[in-house]
Amino acid sequence: MALKVQKFGGTSVADIDRIKSVADRVTKSYDQGDRVVVVLSAMAGVTDKLISLAESASSSPDSRELDVLLATGEQTTAALLAMILKDRGYTATSLLGFQAGIITDHSAGKARILDIEANRITALLEKKHIVVVAGFQGRDEDGNITTLGRGGSDTSAVAIASAIKADVCEIFTDVDGVYTTDPRICSKARKINKISYEEMLEMAILGAKVLQIRSVEFAKKYNVPVHVRSSFNEEEGTMVVNESADMESVVVSGVTCDKNEARITLKKVPDQPGISATIFGALADANIMVDMIIQNTRSGGETDVTFTVTKSDFKKACEISEIVAKEIGATDVLTAENIAKVSVIGLGMKSNSGVAATMFKALASENINIRLISTSEIRISCVVEAKYAELAVRVLHTAFGLDMEEM
């Protein structure tokens, strides 16, 4: 008997038949004696359709009202699942985010959870209800409906699991776990049975789409065991848990690829105190997130400053960089969109030397030129030309011994 939070993504609730399959999964746990809270996403494609509808109604949809509209996607699936469960004779109650006590800040469209007042959920569980919660949403302190951004249902589920002290948060999706790399890129990718919060967070940040970044941050902060598994089979998936001694025996756990980056270089920037603050302060004021930053010092008191941003921020970042370049006396702004970031991640890097050398040698063996390099304690990232990205992933996957053995 366990207290479980089970989250199902958009493909898992894409139509009534799939919602009925979710009901099968939920009732199986309930019949085994588990107490269950279910967190649902909107049906696949519904959020995009609602955004399109809003844009047809207004050239610039009001952010508050857009949140109200988008929240209806998850409201629909929660109500439908509760109806199906009740028809089968189970006691079930659907709750919207605000009814479930999810309190957020005021950031429409990308709200962050501040607190969860889980009393209502807990009371329903004590009465042996199956509690069905609409994910992706909450309310701010003024009572306005807010949404958490893409992938926000993952965050809802982990946050609720932490608030009710669940034994596990099961994330059901269209893949059967976390893989050493994207199986669509590398046919030899294999499922990881157990991965640390730190490794999973790096993989999510670096392009792995299995879990939303904030959900991993929540899980790590509150020590919530997360089980990533498939909605379409009964196999065990991947457990995301605290670091353990045996995890460090694996030098590299995974390889990721992110093609959603672009590069900007300011040439011959004056090498003076405060210059970097001017450049990156202007970008921060425009809410542009900067990823990799490299500074190459020249002779004569000048330096080149290179950084990467997401493609969605690229145009705005270029405009700001041109303005700042004139202000600080940089000679030119160079840009490139045809790049990709490939990364290797692993706890074992903390205690093993030679990881960077192996990575660089493997890329060189295929004549893949490295444009930028950045590192952390458990990660090395290289920017390469986009056309070599998938080849780089496969080469690195082999170089670090991650290939699945032939059956």
Image: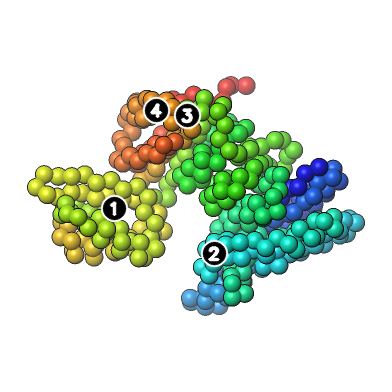
Marks 1,3: beta carbons within 8 A: no
Q: Marks 1 and 3, Cα distance to the nearest angstrom?
A: 32 Å
Earlier residue among tags 3 and 4: 3
Q: Which residue is mark 1?
A: 264
Q: What amino acid is found at the position of numbered circle 4 in the picture? A: Val
Which residue lies at the image location 48% right of the left edge and 33% below the top edge? Answer: 346
Q: Quadrant of the C terminus?
A: top right
- Label placed on residue 228: none
The correct choice, above or below, for 14 with respect to 388 in the image is below
Q: Which quadrant of the view contains residue 118? A: bottom right
Mark 4, Cα crowd under 10 Å, few <14 / some 14-19 / many 20+, is some
Element type where label 4 sits in the image: helix
Q: Marks 1 and 2, Cα distance to the nearest angstrom?
A: 29 Å
Q: Which quadrant of the view contains residue 146? A: bottom right
- In the depicted view, which residue is nearer to us: 398 or 286? 286
Frontmost of labels 1 and 4 is 4
Q: Which quadrant of the view contains residue 370? A: top left
Marks 2,3: beta carbons within 8 A: no
In the rendered image, residue 230, in percent from the top left (x then y), is placed at 68, 42
- In the depicted view, which residue is nearer to us: 142 or 236? 142
Which residue lies at the image location 23% right of the left edge and 63% below the top edge? Answer: 324
In the rendered image, residue 8, in percent from the top left (x then y), is placed at 69, 51
- Label placed on residue 348: 3
Q: What amino acid is found at the position of numbered circle 2 in the picture? A: Ala
Q: Quadrant of the N terminus?
A: top right
- Residue found at the far right of this picture: 89
Earlier residue among tags 1 and 2: 2
Which residue lies at the image location 74% right of the left edge and 38% below the top edge? Answer: 234
Frontmost of labels 3 and 4 is 3
